[in-house]
Amino acid sequence: MIKARTDWTGLFFAAALTVVIVFPLLIVGTWAFTNVWRYPSVIPQEFGLKYWAATTARADVWTSITMSLSLASVVTLLSAVICLPAAFAFARLEFPGRNILFFSFLAGQAFPKFGLLVAIAGIFLNLNLIGTFWGVILIQLVGTLLFMIWIPVAAFQSVDRRMEEAARDVGASPLRVFWSITMPQAGPTIAAAVLLNFVGTFYETEGAWLIGAPGIRTLPVLMISFINNQPVIQYGAVLSVLLWLPSFIALLFARRIIGSGSFARGFGG
Amino acid sequence: MIIWPILSAIGRTLWLPGADGVSRFSLETYVFFFSDQYSINNLMVTLWTTGVCALLLLPICLPIALYLRFAKGRLAAYVQGLAIFPMFVPSIILSYAIIRVLGPNGTVDLLFNSVGLPKIRSPYLTPWGPVIGLVWDNIPLTVLILLSGLGAVSDQSVEAARDVGARRWAVLWHIILPRITNSILVAISFTVLGIFSAFTLPYVLGPAAPEMMGPFMQRTFRDLNDPTNAITQAVISFAFCIVFGLFYVRSVAKNRKT
Amino acid sequence: MAVLDIKDVTKIFGGTVAVERFNLTVADGELVCLLGPSGSGKSTLLRMIGGFETATSGVIAIDGEDVTRVPPERRPTGMVFQSHALWTHMNVFKNLAFGLKLRRLPPAEIKDRVEAVLEQVGLAGYGQRQTHQLSGGQQQRVALARSLVLEPKILLLDEPFASLDQHLRERLREEVRDLQQRLKITTLFVTHGQDEALALADRIVVLRAGRSEQIDPPDVVYRAPATPFVAGFIGTMNLIDGVVEGGVFRHPGLDLAMPVADGPATLAVRPEALGIAAATSAAAVIHRVTDYGTHAIVDIDLADGLRLKAMAPDARAWAAGTAVALSPQAFAVYRDNVAIHRAGA
């Protein structure tokens, strides 16, 4: 029996990344289930769920969770309705002004996002959209447009034209081809894009704060105030774990497309 | 949707409403920005952070990407999973985790203390805080972009180079690097654009003064209620990023055509 | 059971003419090969018949019915694509059943027909497989079955075996030929491989730059190529440019009497029709002898550098460096792209 050569480089990267990436998150996780942890003990003095009860009993936590969820749902829905047909048009049809439109979308990536948000906020100030629900929806929508056009365009383009032609050949109408062939083929990637979009919006902090505060308070905005003003560490830790849940779900679903490379190509790699 | 806000931003900062309600052309907000020591310090610290992050990211991510390109098996899958993982950690949770680990009386302090070492000088609330956070946050995309560039380097071309006698470093320098120059530049552009506009991490982890452009703009806009100056700051950060931005857009567009 | 009529069909993409004034009638149950180099317009022609491109001008009719502007889903044609184009999100059964479902057939009948056609292509019992679990040859068989199950009037095959290896290609070629003869289905087959065309076709259409050069049965295309292009494209052919003076074709190292008017001409001789004999003049010298066992191919260099091939029964009779005299037994002479004289054959 031949023993495989030990992959030292791999072990090194695995160990280093584990320490740097997993370790800090484990600490937060530990804090969330800790009742008492006083300096300088290396491990907490008392584990428990005391602060889960305390955190979930807070009204501001619940209102911000509802706010974040409804914001993310509305934004995702709107951006899917706007972007998916646009993505299909970009991927398959030739129409006048296609390139100009395309470049204007691209141009959005040429500017630092926060600066863009400030510029838009400046316009919203005149439109009295500051501090309103729809103001936040609009600004978050801007952030998602690119993402939601980009990845679906790549997904539609990667569907083999001849598969669609073969379906026409056996008697399917263009609409039927779209539903029975194009969508199932592009579907997983698009579903992942929608999911990532939802999660991204859920965590979006900058726009929500810039436009929404103080009336609209999303979960991440609440988290910032916990970090800055809350002496009880566990509140933040519990909230972090709660906050991370949607991301964890996204992680489970989206692993496939992100590993597959078409995602990185979407970013111009 | 995108061009219009930018044009309007430029317009609004150049034509200021006068006392009599009539707009007049003026450069005074820009003059103010560049004559104000505080603003300049903020810009400098942003540039410094961006530069340091870009410099740190490449030596960290390139070896990882190289390893992932040529390694196979479970360990490589694990490394890839970890490298992509930060993408699924919102920056706000990351900030919190960094405070807990590296902050005063954080986990590192605890561990050092238990073996009798002195406390570290915490990077929390210093310019190094955002640097650590931003590097952490940007690892996944940088690795992915580099990896996708490395995908274009065929196994055969590497083997052919080995065949004519090239050593590891020669292969890296003469065969691999020239092919992925574009990917490296894209990764850098992306990082620069991302960091210039970073908000959460610098806001939570960084010092109160000088602050990075993100928090600076936000504070000017909200707390000082001075949108004109905030937009001026935005336009100035546009100007600093335009080179990277244009490069990025160009390479994405090129990528799509082929 | 169908007749295909193509009348004066032209296709222009942007500014380039892909197919120019093309005419062809395919009889019921006939198998016609469209043969030509890449860019000759053969695939474009096939795609126009299938409905994936619309002819710029001209008429395509199936059984006398004009289908020129009918979309592919309403044409009685079935196409097999080069890259099989199977729907990877469906298993084999669903791939075959999709078209039948669109026609609203009862499930029991769909099942029967799918099973019958799988049997025909030698894949009985493969219905529940996923497409990626099949080999390249099996995938192409499924693609063929997907077209056949709808009983199209016309079967179109677009270089269906191009991505397969030589051995598999020959086997599938036989299968397609058998199937086509059993079902008596009118078939058009696009290929750039001359041996494929010679082995399969009832008639071959040789295409060049969007125009048809010759439409004839394989033996005629091989033995009496209509143009120098066809002569050079099908099989091995020695093409010798020369001048006819006083009834004698002249080229350095080769003089040949022929009843042709004076002027430039191209002489075409197959290797098997080029006789060689030992000689003293050094105008034609053997460069190399390749022994194939059953016969030998002798490469001969003429004085001006032109290299000819001749077939000889026994390799041992010839050696490199020997001077030879050439005597074409059967040949054709071309002038202005048409054959002006044939001899032997």
Image (tube, coloured by chain):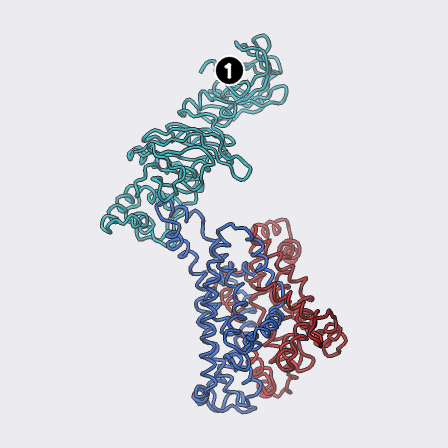
- Looking at the picture, how far across and down is residue A234, in whole percent? 50, 87
Task: Provide the residue designation for mark 1.
Answer: C340
- Looking at the picture, how far across and down is residue C131, in whole percent? 37, 51
Q: Which residue: 50% across, 79% down?
A: A218
Relative to A204, say whether A90 is above or below.
Answer: above
Quarter of the figure that contains the N terminus of chain B? bottom right
Give the chain coloured blue.
A
**Amino acid at dot 1:** Ile
- Looking at the picture, how far across and down is residue C174, in whole percent? 35, 35
Give the chain coloured cyan.
C
Q: Which residue: 39% across, 36% down?
A: C170
Q: Is residue C80 left or right of residue C323?
A: left
Q: Nearer the viewer, residue B108 or A94?
A: A94
- Residue extending furthest left? C108
Q: Is residue B78 left or right of residue A210?
A: left
- Looking at the picture, how far across and down is residue C316, in whole percent? 50, 21
Which quarter of the figure has residue B151? bottom right
Which quarter of the figure has residue C4? top left
Q: Nearer the viewer, residue A246 or B101?
A: A246
Relative to A203, say whether C227 is above or below.
Answer: above
Q: Nearer the viewer, residue C161 or A87?
A: A87
Give the chain coloured red.
B
Q: Is residue B61 left or right of residue A176?
A: right
Secondary-structure class at tag 1: strand
